Image (spheres, rainbow, N blue to C red):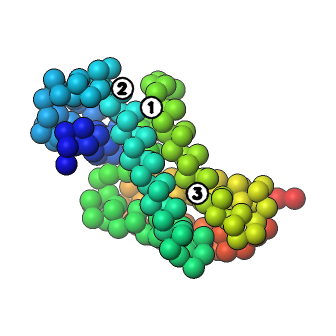
Amino acid sequence: METRERLVDAMSTSMRQRGYGSSAMKDVLDEASATAGSMYHFFPDGKEQLATAAVREIGLAAAAQLSANIESSPSVADGAVAFYEALADDMKSTGFRYGCPIGVPMTELAYVVEGVREAGAEVFTAWVSAIAEALEGEGWSAEEALLAARFAICAYEGASTLARATHDSAYISATRDVVHNVLSQPRHFVPR
């Protein structure tokens, strides 16, 4: 892995565990096996620029994985389930120490660090779009698809937070099942 990738990965991991404010650059540099000089070479504006890159790059990679899950599954609902199952596996394998790489920094600093907030908004929009566009491909109306996709991502973030707080992946499993049901049935929950 190249130095830039290691820096992005280390910053993302740190924010997942500690949040943006408590992510000390010394720890990030140690984790990435990088020097301050190399960090400033890639991210001349420092911590904020690195955090913005971490949120954007890790989040858009997750959007691509979500799309791939959906494309390789029999239905959008089944593809979304894989996204939830990956979250549960990650939470359990890390002893619930790490939250969502997008959700944790967004809840901490949504309006404090504008670049990071904008990157998070871009990522959440990409996640919603991946589901909504696929639902439209299954015959849903654009309005219904967008509402269902927003619900699925909001539920994902809530399940992530509750599972981390309680050290119980049952929140993810229960949410996964409800999201699967919602995404399997157009007009199931859309208010009229």
Residue receiving disc 2 = 48
Cα–Cα span, label 2 and label 1 = 7 Å
> Which numbered tag is attached to residue 116?
1
Residue 40 left/right relative to 183: left
Q: Are marks 2 and 1 in contact (CB under 8 Å)?
A: yes
Residue receiving disc 3 = 130
Residue 131, by quadrant, is bottom right
Residue 30, by quadrant, is top left
Residue 63 image offset from top left, x and y in percent:
49, 54
Q: Residue at x 41, y 40 (%)?
A: 55
Comparing labels 3 and 2, the label whose residue is closer to the camera: 3
User: Is residue 2 visible to us here?
Assistant: yes
Q: Residues within 10 Å of mark 1 (few under 14, many from 20)?
A: many
Residue 87 image offset from top left, x and y in percent:
41, 62
Q: Residue at x 70, y 54 (%)?
A: 146
| Count of residue discs | 3
